[in-house]
Image: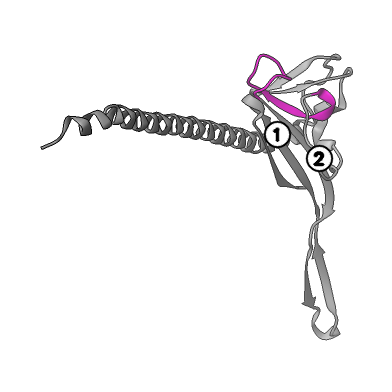
């Protein structure tokens, strides 16, 4: 039989134990909420990175076709005035001066190491705007530069019969190796740069 004195001694211990369990559950709830928030942020940042990468890659792929058109047409929008925009198939080229040489970007020299496209006319050849203007993200800026190289030639030697000597026939040519750098600036400072080489055979 439990004495009244024993019950009086244990009065309040159940309340204290309940409060301790509730506190532990509250801490566990807060920690799981923070973990969930962190996971959501990580997932969002991963999505932004992937969007930036695919936009930059798409810009590089599209600019190779634009480059071939630029070579074929010997430039775009001839006679365009200063501070104008030449639009070609959803892509744009902005000019600083009248009949800007940037409209003939197929003639650009080799790009220096580490040079990245920027959101200004001087720092890019082509851009694909997605934001309200040509400088506000999201935007894909593209820079193109080429270097001419001699291609490897083929040679054959044909026997000239009784003379015992060979008659040579050699063929070769040249190509331009273009560096195409595409930089996508996305939302929340997300950024991705894709660089590829494009060989134009002459």
* Residue 132 is inside the magenta segment: yes
Query: Spatial distance from mark 2 to mark 1, Cα to Cα?
Result: 15 Å
The location of residue 39, given as percent across then percent down, is: 48, 35
Q: Is residue 179 left or right of residue 190?
A: right
In the rendered image, the vertical position of residue 79 relative to residue 180, given as above or below: above
User: Can you tell which quarter of the image residue 115 is in?
Assistant: top right
Which residue position is annotated with label 2? 145
Front residue of 2 and 48: 2
Reading the chain from its start, which is encountered first: label 2 or label 1? 2
- Dot 2 falls on a residue whose secondary structure is strand
Between 84 and 41, the residue placed more toward the observer is 41
Q: On the picture, is 12 further left or further right than 49?
A: left
Q: Are marks 2 and 1 in contact (CB under 8 Å)?
A: no
| Segment colored magenta | 120-138
Mark number, residue 105:
none
Residue on which the image places disc 1 = 183
Q: Quadrant of the N terminus?
A: top left
């Amino acid at each position: 039989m439990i004495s009244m004195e024993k019950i009086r001694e244990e009065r309040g211990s159940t309340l204290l134990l309940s409060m301790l369990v509730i506190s532990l559950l509250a801490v566990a709830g807060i920690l799981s909420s923070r973990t969930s928030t962190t996971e959501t942020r990580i997932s969002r940042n991963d999505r932004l990175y992937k969007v930036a990468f695919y936009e930059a890659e798409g810009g590089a792929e599209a600019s190779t076709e634009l480059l071939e058109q630029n070579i074929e047409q010997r430039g775009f929008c001839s006679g365009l005035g200063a501070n104008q925009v030449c639009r070609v198939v959803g892509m744009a080229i902005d000019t600083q001066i009248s009949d800007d040489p940037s409209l003939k970007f197929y003639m650009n020299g080799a790009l220096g190491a580490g040079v990245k496209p920027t959101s200004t006319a001087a720092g890019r050849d082509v851009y694909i705007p997605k934001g309200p203007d040509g400088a506000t993200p999201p935007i894909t800026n593209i820079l193109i530069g080429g270097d001419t190289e001699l291609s490897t030639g083929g040679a054959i030697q044909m026997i000239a019969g009784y003379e015992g000597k060979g008659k040579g026939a050699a063929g070769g040519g040249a190509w331009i190796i273009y560096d195409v750098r595409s930089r996508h600036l996305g939302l929340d400072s997300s950024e991705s740069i894709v660089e590829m080489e494009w060989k134009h055979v002459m």
